Amino acid sequence: MPVSDASPDMRAHTFEKVSRTIGFVAIVLPLVCVIAGVIRVIPPNDLQNSIFHFYYIPFLGDFFVGCLIFNGILLLFTFHTNGVPVPGWQNLSSRESLMMRFAGVSSIMIALFPTGGPSDSYSKSELIRVFSQLTKYPDEVGGSIAAATPAFDFQNLHWLLDLYWQKIFAGVMFAILAYFTYCVFTRVQMDASRLKADELTPQKLKRNRYYRFFGIVIALSTVGLIIGVFGLVISLGTWDHYNATFALEAFALLAFGFAWLIKGRYFTSLND
Protein backbone atom coordinates (compact mmCIF):
# COMPACT_ATOMS: atom_id res chain seq x y z
CA MET A 1 0.00 0.00 0.00
CA PRO A 2 1.43 3.45 -0.87
CA VAL A 3 2.16 5.63 2.14
CA SER A 4 -0.19 8.29 0.81
CA ASP A 5 -3.06 5.75 0.89
CA ALA A 6 -2.39 4.55 4.43
CA SER A 7 -4.82 5.40 7.21
CA PRO A 8 -3.95 8.29 9.57
CA ASP A 9 -3.35 5.86 12.44
CA MET A 10 -1.01 3.73 10.31
CA ARG A 11 0.91 6.80 9.21
CA ALA A 12 1.10 7.99 12.81
CA HIS A 13 2.57 4.62 13.80
CA THR A 14 5.11 4.92 10.98
CA PHE A 15 6.03 8.45 12.04
CA GLU A 16 6.59 7.23 15.60
CA LYS A 17 8.88 4.41 14.49
CA VAL A 18 10.88 6.67 12.20
CA SER A 19 11.14 9.35 14.91
CA ARG A 20 12.58 6.78 17.30
CA THR A 21 15.06 5.62 14.69
CA ILE A 22 16.21 9.18 13.99
CA GLY A 23 16.57 9.77 17.73
CA PHE A 24 18.62 6.65 18.35
CA VAL A 25 20.96 7.39 15.43
CA ALA A 26 21.49 10.98 16.64
CA ILE A 27 22.36 9.70 20.14
CA VAL A 28 24.57 6.81 19.05
CA LEU A 29 26.75 8.93 16.71
CA PRO A 30 28.41 11.15 19.37
CA LEU A 31 28.55 8.31 21.91
CA VAL A 32 30.45 6.07 19.50
CA CYS A 33 32.86 8.91 18.71
CA VAL A 34 33.43 9.57 22.42
CA ILE A 35 34.04 5.89 23.16
CA ALA A 36 36.41 5.57 20.19
CA GLY A 37 38.36 8.63 21.34
CA VAL A 38 38.54 7.52 24.97
CA ILE A 39 39.52 3.88 24.52
CA ARG A 40 42.00 4.88 21.77
CA VAL A 41 41.97 1.71 19.74
CA ILE A 42 41.26 3.30 16.33
CA PRO A 43 43.86 5.63 14.76
CA PRO A 44 44.62 8.46 15.39
CA ASN A 45 43.98 7.20 18.92
CA ASP A 46 42.56 10.41 20.29
CA LEU A 47 39.39 12.42 20.67
CA GLN A 48 38.97 14.73 17.69
CA ASN A 49 38.35 18.47 17.87
CA SER A 50 35.06 17.95 16.07
CA ILE A 51 32.69 15.06 15.48
CA PHE A 52 32.95 15.99 11.81
CA HIS A 53 36.70 15.20 11.90
CA PHE A 54 35.83 11.54 12.39
CA TYR A 55 35.03 11.65 8.68
CA TYR A 56 38.74 11.02 8.05
CA ILE A 57 39.14 8.04 10.38
CA PRO A 58 38.93 4.47 9.03
CA PHE A 59 35.61 2.76 9.86
CA LEU A 60 34.39 5.69 11.97
CA GLY A 61 34.33 7.86 8.87
CA ASP A 62 32.01 5.40 7.15
CA PHE A 63 29.87 5.21 10.28
CA PHE A 64 29.71 9.01 10.51
CA VAL A 65 28.73 9.45 6.85
CA GLY A 66 26.22 6.59 7.05
CA CYS A 67 24.45 8.08 10.09
CA LEU A 68 24.13 11.51 8.48
CA ILE A 69 22.85 10.20 5.16
CA PHE A 70 20.49 7.72 6.84
CA ASN A 71 18.88 10.38 9.04
CA GLY A 72 18.90 12.83 6.15
CA ILE A 73 16.91 10.46 3.94
CA LEU A 74 14.37 9.84 6.72
CA LEU A 75 13.91 13.57 7.30
CA LEU A 76 13.71 14.21 3.58
CA PHE A 77 11.07 11.66 2.64
CA THR A 78 9.04 10.71 5.72
CA PHE A 79 7.40 13.58 7.56
CA HIS A 80 4.90 14.92 5.04
CA THR A 81 1.21 14.66 5.87
CA ASN A 82 -0.04 15.76 2.40
CA GLY A 83 -3.16 17.17 3.99
CA VAL A 84 -3.98 13.95 5.87
CA PRO A 85 -4.58 14.63 9.62
CA VAL A 86 -1.91 12.38 11.11
CA PRO A 87 -2.19 12.07 14.92
CA GLY A 88 0.86 13.67 16.48
CA TRP A 89 1.57 15.77 13.38
CA GLN A 90 -1.81 17.42 12.75
CA ASN A 91 -0.57 21.02 12.81
CA LEU A 92 2.44 20.58 10.56
CA SER A 93 2.21 23.27 7.87
CA SER A 94 3.41 22.92 4.28
CA ARG A 95 6.16 25.44 5.03
CA GLU A 96 7.35 23.32 7.94
CA SER A 97 7.25 20.20 5.80
CA LEU A 98 9.55 22.02 3.40
CA MET A 99 11.83 22.98 6.29
CA MET A 100 11.99 19.32 7.31
CA ARG A 101 13.04 18.41 3.79
CA PHE A 102 15.74 21.06 3.87
CA ALA A 103 17.01 19.69 7.19
CA GLY A 104 17.29 16.29 5.52
CA VAL A 105 19.17 17.74 2.56
CA SER A 106 21.49 19.59 4.95
CA SER A 107 22.28 16.38 6.82
CA ILE A 108 23.23 14.68 3.56
CA MET A 109 25.30 17.67 2.42
CA ILE A 110 27.26 17.62 5.68
CA ALA A 111 28.41 14.12 4.73
CA LEU A 112 29.23 15.13 1.15
CA PHE A 113 31.09 18.32 2.06
CA PRO A 114 33.59 17.30 4.77
CA THR A 115 35.10 19.82 7.13
CA GLY A 116 38.79 20.62 7.11
CA GLY A 117 41.03 17.77 8.22
CA PRO A 118 42.18 17.37 11.82
CA SER A 119 45.25 19.48 12.47
CA ASP A 120 48.49 17.48 12.69
CA SER A 121 46.62 14.15 12.75
CA TYR A 122 47.26 13.28 9.11
CA SER A 123 49.67 14.21 6.38
CA LYS A 124 48.21 16.03 3.42
CA SER A 125 48.47 12.95 1.21
CA GLU A 126 46.25 10.97 3.57
CA LEU A 127 43.44 13.47 3.21
CA ILE A 128 43.32 13.19 -0.57
CA ARG A 129 40.43 11.20 -1.94
CA VAL A 130 40.79 9.86 -5.46
CA PHE A 131 39.16 7.61 -8.01
CA SER A 132 41.90 5.32 -9.29
CA GLN A 133 42.27 3.75 -12.71
CA LEU A 134 43.94 0.36 -12.93
CA THR A 135 47.00 0.61 -15.16
CA LYS A 136 49.07 -2.54 -14.53
CA TYR A 137 48.52 -6.14 -13.55
CA PRO A 138 51.07 -8.06 -11.43
CA ASP A 139 53.83 -9.56 -13.56
CA GLU A 140 54.85 -12.26 -11.15
CA VAL A 141 53.78 -14.02 -8.02
CA GLY A 142 54.62 -11.95 -5.00
CA GLY A 143 54.59 -8.72 -6.94
CA SER A 144 52.31 -5.80 -6.26
CA ILE A 145 48.67 -6.59 -6.77
CA ALA A 146 48.20 -3.72 -9.21
CA ALA A 147 49.44 -0.30 -10.08
CA ALA A 148 46.97 2.55 -10.42
CA THR A 149 46.95 6.19 -11.34
CA PRO A 150 44.48 8.79 -10.05
CA ALA A 151 41.55 9.22 -12.40
CA PHE A 152 40.05 12.10 -10.42
CA ASP A 153 41.45 13.89 -7.39
CA PHE A 154 38.93 15.49 -5.04
CA GLN A 155 41.72 17.69 -3.72
CA ASN A 156 41.24 19.64 -6.95
CA LEU A 157 37.93 20.78 -5.45
CA HIS A 158 39.62 22.43 -2.46
CA TRP A 159 38.37 25.83 -3.69
CA LEU A 160 34.83 24.56 -3.35
CA LEU A 161 35.34 22.82 0.00
CA ASP A 162 37.00 25.95 1.40
CA LEU A 163 33.73 27.88 1.13
CA TYR A 164 32.57 26.59 4.54
CA TRP A 165 29.73 24.57 3.02
CA GLN A 166 29.92 21.98 5.76
CA LYS A 167 29.60 24.63 8.47
CA ILE A 168 26.75 26.34 6.62
CA PHE A 169 24.75 23.14 6.21
CA ALA A 170 25.43 22.14 9.82
CA GLY A 171 24.20 25.51 11.06
CA VAL A 172 21.06 25.30 8.91
CA MET A 173 20.29 21.76 10.05
CA PHE A 174 20.71 22.52 13.75
CA ALA A 175 18.69 25.76 13.44
CA ILE A 176 15.77 23.92 11.81
CA LEU A 177 15.91 21.12 14.37
CA ALA A 178 15.95 23.66 17.22
CA TYR A 179 12.86 25.32 15.72
CA PHE A 180 11.00 22.02 15.41
CA THR A 181 11.94 20.93 18.92
CA TYR A 182 10.98 24.19 20.60
CA CYS A 183 8.10 25.44 18.44
CA VAL A 184 6.51 22.52 16.59
CA PHE A 185 6.77 19.65 19.06
CA THR A 186 5.28 21.77 21.86
CA ARG A 187 2.01 22.29 19.98
CA VAL A 188 -1.05 20.22 20.75
CA GLN A 189 -0.90 17.64 17.96
CA MET A 190 -3.29 15.05 19.42
CA ASP A 191 -6.74 15.33 20.97
CA ALA A 192 -5.58 13.04 23.79
CA SER A 193 -3.13 15.74 24.93
CA ARG A 194 -5.92 18.15 25.82
CA LEU A 195 -8.27 18.06 28.79
CA LYS A 196 -11.50 19.99 29.13
CA ALA A 197 -11.37 23.78 28.93
CA ASP A 198 -8.28 23.57 26.74
CA GLU A 199 -6.09 22.41 29.60
CA LEU A 200 -3.13 20.23 28.70
CA THR A 201 -2.58 16.83 30.25
CA PRO A 202 0.23 16.50 32.83
CA GLN A 203 2.14 14.31 30.38
CA LYS A 204 1.92 16.93 27.63
CA LEU A 205 3.07 19.66 29.99
CA LYS A 206 6.04 17.52 30.98
CA ARG A 207 6.87 16.74 27.36
CA ASN A 208 6.78 20.44 26.53
CA ARG A 209 9.27 21.21 29.28
CA TYR A 210 11.64 18.65 27.82
CA TYR A 211 11.09 19.94 24.28
CA ARG A 212 11.83 23.52 25.29
CA PHE A 213 14.91 22.49 27.22
CA PHE A 214 16.28 20.42 24.34
CA GLY A 215 15.41 23.15 21.85
CA ILE A 216 17.34 25.70 23.90
CA VAL A 217 20.32 23.31 24.15
CA ILE A 218 20.38 22.88 20.37
CA ALA A 219 20.05 26.63 19.77
CA LEU A 220 22.72 27.61 22.30
CA SER A 221 25.06 24.91 21.00
CA THR A 222 24.61 26.24 17.47
CA VAL A 223 25.34 29.81 18.55
CA GLY A 224 28.35 28.58 20.54
CA LEU A 225 29.70 26.74 17.51
CA ILE A 226 29.40 29.87 15.35
CA ILE A 227 31.21 31.92 17.97
CA GLY A 228 33.89 29.31 18.58
CA VAL A 229 34.85 28.02 15.14
CA PHE A 230 35.30 31.55 13.82
CA GLY A 231 37.32 32.65 16.87
CA LEU A 232 34.94 35.48 17.75
CA VAL A 233 35.56 35.34 21.52
CA ILE A 234 38.60 33.16 22.22
CA SER A 235 41.42 31.95 20.01
CA LEU A 236 40.77 28.88 17.92
CA GLY A 237 43.79 27.17 19.49
CA THR A 238 42.34 27.49 22.99
CA TRP A 239 38.92 26.46 21.70
CA ASP A 240 40.33 23.30 20.11
CA HIS A 241 42.48 22.52 23.17
CA TYR A 242 39.32 21.92 25.20
CA ASN A 243 37.51 20.08 22.38
CA ALA A 244 34.75 22.68 22.67
CA THR A 245 33.48 22.10 19.14
CA PHE A 246 33.14 18.38 19.78
CA ALA A 247 31.34 19.00 23.09
CA LEU A 248 28.80 21.44 21.61
CA GLU A 249 28.15 19.19 18.61
CA ALA A 250 27.62 16.26 20.97
CA PHE A 251 25.21 18.27 23.17
CA ALA A 252 23.21 19.36 20.13
CA LEU A 253 22.99 15.82 18.72
CA LEU A 254 22.05 14.29 22.08
CA ALA A 255 19.36 16.94 22.67
CA PHE A 256 18.07 16.38 19.14
CA GLY A 257 18.06 12.61 19.66
CA PHE A 258 16.21 12.60 22.98
CA ALA A 259 13.63 15.11 21.70
CA TRP A 260 12.85 12.80 18.79
CA LEU A 261 12.64 9.77 21.06
CA ILE A 262 10.01 11.63 23.08
CA LYS A 263 8.21 12.61 19.89
CA GLY A 264 8.29 8.96 18.85
CA ARG A 265 6.56 8.05 22.15
CA TYR A 266 9.48 5.90 23.23
CA PHE A 267 9.20 6.88 26.91
CA THR A 268 5.84 5.48 27.95
CA SER A 269 5.68 7.54 31.15
CA LEU A 270 5.50 10.70 29.02
CA ASN A 271 2.73 9.48 26.74
CA ASP A 272 -0.92 10.49 27.09
Image: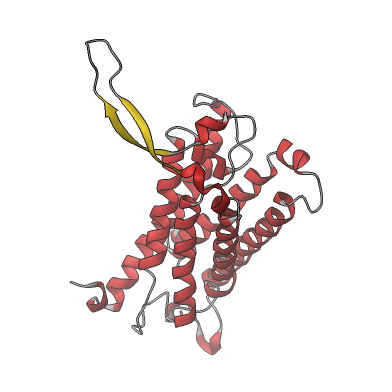
Position of 239 relative to 69 (above/below): above
Asked if residue 75 lies left or right of residue 182, the reply is left
Give how far across and how far down residue 45 sits, in percent.
Answer: 56, 25
Residue that sits furthest to the bottom in the current view: 197
Q: Is residue 154 visible?
A: yes
Instruction: Give residue 200's quadrant in the image.
Output: bottom right
Asked if residue 122 lies left or right of residue 152, the reply is right
Give how far across and how far down residue 21 sits, in percent.
Answer: 39, 55
Residue that sits furthest to the left in the current view: 1
Say which residue appears at 73% left-offset and 50% top-offset.
Answer: 228
| Quadrant of the rendering where the N terminus is positioned | bottom left
Position of 97 relative to 215 (above/below): below
Count of numbered tags: 0
Give how far across and how far down residue 74 sits, in percent.
Answer: 38, 61
Say which residue appears at 70% left-offset and 50% top-offset.
Answer: 229
Position of 61 relative to 181 (above/below): above
Instruction: Give residue 136's quadrant in the image.
Output: top left
Give the camera-side residue of 208 and 168: 168
| Quadrant of the rendering where the C terminus is positioned | bottom left
Q: How is the image coloured?
A: secondary structure
Give the camera-side residue of 175 and 191: 175
Q: Is residue 253 visible?
A: no
Give how far across and how far down residue 5 sits, in percent.
Answer: 22, 78
Give the camera-side residue of 134 and 100: 134
Give the camera-side residue of 243 and 150: 150
